[in-house]
Amino acid sequence: MPTIIIRDAEPGDVPTILRFVRELAMFENELEAVVATEADFLRDGFGPARRFFCRIALLDDAPAGFTLWFRNYSTWQGRAGLYIEDLYVTEAARGQGVGRRLLADLARTAVQEKAGRIDLSVLHWNPARGFYEAAGLTHRDDWLPYRIEGAAIAALATEIP
């Protein structure tokens, strides 16, 4: 039976985190969109102004996946929640309980922090949707995701004199 350990990421894990991000982007057919660097992850995950949190899954002592999340806030609940930016398990480790352990670990964090909810986004074609639904997450079809990026942000910002 394989041994699964979930632990806090450390600065020395940054190359592995970036590798996992790239593998996830490759799976989502968006590898060219990854412009993040190790320096970005060091600054934002381990620097003085921490912007995200990360846990690493080890399967028999080898890195097998990770969760990367940040806090959001619900004005309706009056409390923070957790937003999962990435939950990734390497192809070789899938089906061995690593993803479920990562998700349960984050749920434990949510309970400890009295977070009101855990949110994430999943591509409509991603087979992981079944995994999330089996864990109790529900698809929200009443809310539509919107985003603004890059040049559109800059253009909107110029509207303020």
Image: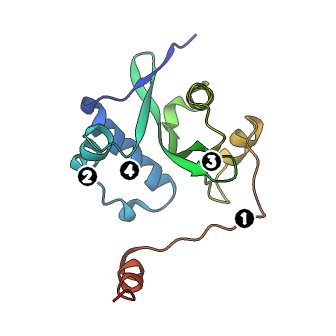
Q: Residue at x 75, y 57 (%)?
A: 140
Position of the N terminus, as image quadrant, is: top right
2 vs 3, front mark? 3
Q: Residues within 10 Å of mark 4 (few under 14, many from 20)?
A: some
Q: Residue at x 40, y 78 (%)?
A: 153
Q: CA distance from mark 4 to mark 2?
A: 11 Å
Q: Nearer the viewer, residue 18 or 39?
A: 39
Disc 3 target residue? 119
Say above or below: 109 vs 21.
above
Identify the mark nearer the N-term, 4 or 1.
Answer: 4
Disc 4 target residue? 22
Q: CA distance from mark 4 to mark 3?
A: 22 Å
Per the rendering, the mark at residue 37 is 2
Q: Is residue 45 left or right of residue 70?
A: left
Per the rendering, the mark at residue 143 is 1
Q: Nearer the viewer, residue 29 or 148?
A: 148
Identify the mark nearer the N-term, 3 or 1.
Answer: 3
Q: CA distance from mark 1 to mark 2?
A: 32 Å
Q: Give amino acid for label 3.
A: Asp
Extreme top residue here? 1
Helix or strand or loop: what does disc 1 sit on?
loop
In the rendering, at what x and y percent does residue 70 appear? 47, 44
Q: CA distance from mark 4 to mark 1?
A: 28 Å
Q: Is residue 160 left or right of residue 95?
A: left
In the rendering, at what x and y percent does residue 90 appear? 48, 36
Quadrant location of residue 154?
bottom left
Position of the C terminus, as image quadrant, is: bottom left
Q: Give amino acid for label 2.
A: Thr
Helix or strand or loop: what does disc 3 sit on?
strand
Identify the mark nearer the N-term, 4 or 2.
Answer: 4
Per the rendering, the mark at residue 107 is none
Q: Nearer the viewer, residue 9 or 15?
A: 9
